[in-house]
Amino acid sequence: MLFNSWGFIGVFLPAVLILYHLASRLVAFRFATSVLAIASILFYAVWNVNLLPVLLASLTLNYLLSYGLGSKADSRLRRFLLILGIGFNLGLLFFFKYAMFAASILTGVSGIEIELGNIILPIGISFFTFQQIAFLVDVYKRETYERDPVSYVLFVTFFPQLIAGPIVHHREMMPQFTDTRREPLSTSLSIGCTIFIIGLAKKVLIADNLALVASPMFDASAVGQSPDMLSAWAGVLAYTLQIYFDFSGYSDMAVGLGRMFGLRLPWNFASPYRATSVIDFWRRWHITLSRFLRDYLYIPLGGGRVMPARRYVNVLITMLLGGIWHGAGWTFFLWGAVHGTLIVINQAWRRRRSRPVLPKFLCFALTMLPVVLAWVLFRSADIDTAGRIYLALIDTSSLPGSFGIAEARQFAYDIEQQLTGLGSGSGLNLAAAAIWLPVAAAIAFLGPNTQWIMERVSAGLQTPGYPSPLDGGT
């Protein structure tokens, strides 16, 4: 059940809002949280009820382990429980998300066919796994704790952030769930609906139309076709903007949904396409994932407290794991490797005492160009597909020899067809690119972001240590 589906907007969401607010105001706040927890479980079950036991098993074991971690047991037992919990969560994630990829690698190396059958990936497993690992580590450090099973279920499964994040901390969410002081219902609904509509517009009006430009080019390349240079660049730039508006839109919808229930979720983006370094980009893109990788992987590896060479290794390990977290495939591995290498270069540059001061526009260009090119790996079905697209990006021989009056008339006609909704939709339509790329780019690079629009009402949570998103951008 997608946030932009009629079933969600017209049936599920209104029903849950009515039940929750009636229960919290007329019955008991404790009952209202139970209603929300049950609704979140039902929301997950709609995706695939056969995979619901995976989520329930994960919830049960992690809750029991957290109970032991929060006890007064000796340090060795608590450390064992932490290792067991992390191992269970990573093992669960590995089986469902990476087992088939690992089997294909072993088959290629050994020549022995390894048949695992059809393993269905539970929706949102990457998010609720990381969220529970963070919770176990925080309980182990005595930074948080949760004895109430209903509250724990709600913390993990709260439906606005269950499927696509943001990845939240227990300590930033649970005080809100247990705070019986509520703002006026009209305030919660007006603020929440406004943010939700902004996110919905990003997804439906911008991202989905950009997909009509990007997907045909990537899909054609996946089956062996080589795009021409203009089509390749149009598709790559369209995907660069599509993935941002899609994910940013979902994150905004999550914040808006949370606000409808009187809860503040963390903002997940802070104008990343205005970054002037790759380090800055990762402090603005998918902030809650960057926070998780920093706090639970990079810092435990030694972070920036070690010698530069070791620090660079830590960065590479962190970004490699961040890459494969997004998907099981060599393209995601290489995408993480590319960004890890870029961050290492950025860090080494910053350590130079005599480095020249570069103009801001040059810093922006040196940041966005590799980010755009790396998205090719992220979107491509395999490495061969990415290779065909990279070659097409520099293949000047595929450019048209001339562009005269006849071609201009045809191009204008194609744009008219797109604007009137009469385009055939077959293949990559450069007219669609001519319409949507400038619009999306103008909004991304020049327009106000959701946080800036909603600044006066404190609609979401700012992540400490990360840039404020109130500097424009979308």
Image (tube, grey):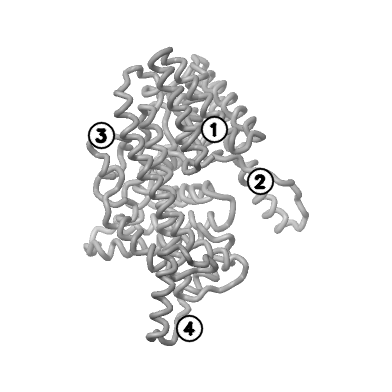
Q: Is residue 93 rendered to the left or right of residue 363?
A: right
Residue type of the residue flagged with mark 4: Ser
* Residue identified by numbered label 4: 397
Measure the C-alpha gap from mark 3 to mark 4.
Answer: 54 Å
Residue 291 is situated, as x and y percent measured from the top left of the image, at 39, 40
Counting residues from the start of the chain, the first of labels 3 and 4 encountered is 4
Q: Is residue 425 rendered to the left or right of residue 350?
A: right
For residue 99, the mark is 2
User: Does residue 178 appear in the picture of this structure?
Assistant: yes
* Residue identified by numbered label 3: 457
Say what secondary structure mark 4 lies in: helix
Residue type of the residue flagged with mark 2: Ala
Disc 2 crowd, CA 10 A, few/some/many (<14, 14-19, 20+): some
* Residue identified by numbered label 1: 43
Q: Is residue 291 rendered to the left or right of residue 150?
A: left
Residue type of the residue flagged with mark 3: Val
Which label lies toward us, 1 or 2? 1
Which label lies toward us, 3 or 4? 3
Q: Is residue 269 rendered to the left or right of residue 326?
A: left
Say what secondary structure mark 2 lies in: helix
Counting residues from the start of the chain, the first of labels 3 and 2 encountered is 2
Quick check: marks 4 and 1 in contact, CB under 8 Å? no
Counting residues from the start of the chain, the first of labels 4 and 1 encountered is 1
